[in-house]
Amino acid sequence: MEFYHLVNKRYSVRGYLSKSIEEEKINYILKVARLAPSAANRQPWKIYIIKDKNLKNKLCEAYPRSWLNEAPIIVVFVGLTDNNWIRNDGKDYLLCDVTIIADYFILAATEVGLGTCYIAAFDEKKVIEALNLPPNEIPLLMTPLGYPKENSIKERKRKEIGEFVVEI
Ligand SMILES: Cc1cc2nc3c(=O)[nH]c(=O)nc-3n(C[C@H](O)[C@H](O)[C@H](O)COP(=O)(O)O)c2cc1C
């Protein structure tokens, strides 16, 4: 798939079918995500793939939206705080690294016809409790993963290129 077409195909899916996801698709998405670059190649991440209904319910308590639980899988992108690259001036690149792997994951999911939605506005403590995460693992992003409902709303509001590009 042409890259522009792939990027244009992705949107925040907020309505899912209960249809289960083929294991080959998940394997393909993970094969792509594995290639994500990271600062100093630290790869300071974990990806939790949650299929268990009880755990999904708990995650939905951290971000109470009905559409999150409609998807057969919820994915949580976790940063490892004991292996993150920090610049000399103290700038922490963990969020940047985890965002990149999440992007790779989400675009690969889009390519194979699956819907996703970046979610950051969750209750961090509740996610930590639900997944029983150790102190060195912080959840930074999550997404539902599933087949989109046909009537999902597609928004496409973006700044014009001239509004965010500075050519000097
Ligand atoms: C880092 C990040 C965090 C986001 N968090 C949420 C969220 O908590 N809940 C939500 O419904 N959408 C969330 N979104 C989705 C954005 O609202 C959405 O990407 C944006 O409005 C553009 O729409 P589009 O994804 O359909 O192109 C998030 C997106 C990003 C990139």
Image (tube, rainbow, N blue to C red):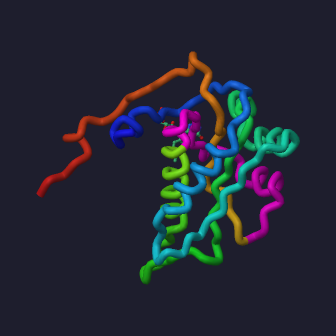
- Residue 88 image offset from top left, x and y in percent: 43, 83
Q: Is residue 121 magenta?
A: yes
> Residue at the spot x=49%, y=39% of the render?
111
Horizontal relation, residue 65 to residue 113: left or right: right
The quadrant holding residue 71 is top right
- Residue 167 image offset from top left, x and y in percent: 14, 53
Residue farthest bottom in this picture: 88
The quadrant holding residue 132 is bottom right
- Residue 158 image offset from top left, x and y in percent: 34, 34
Residue stretch in magenta: 109-135
The N terminus, quarter of image: top left
Horizontal relation, residue 37 to residue 126: left or right: left
Residue farthest left in this picture: 168
Residue farthest top in this picture: 151
- Residue 42 image offset from top left, x and y in percent: 54, 75
Q: Is residue 80 above or below residue 30?
A: below
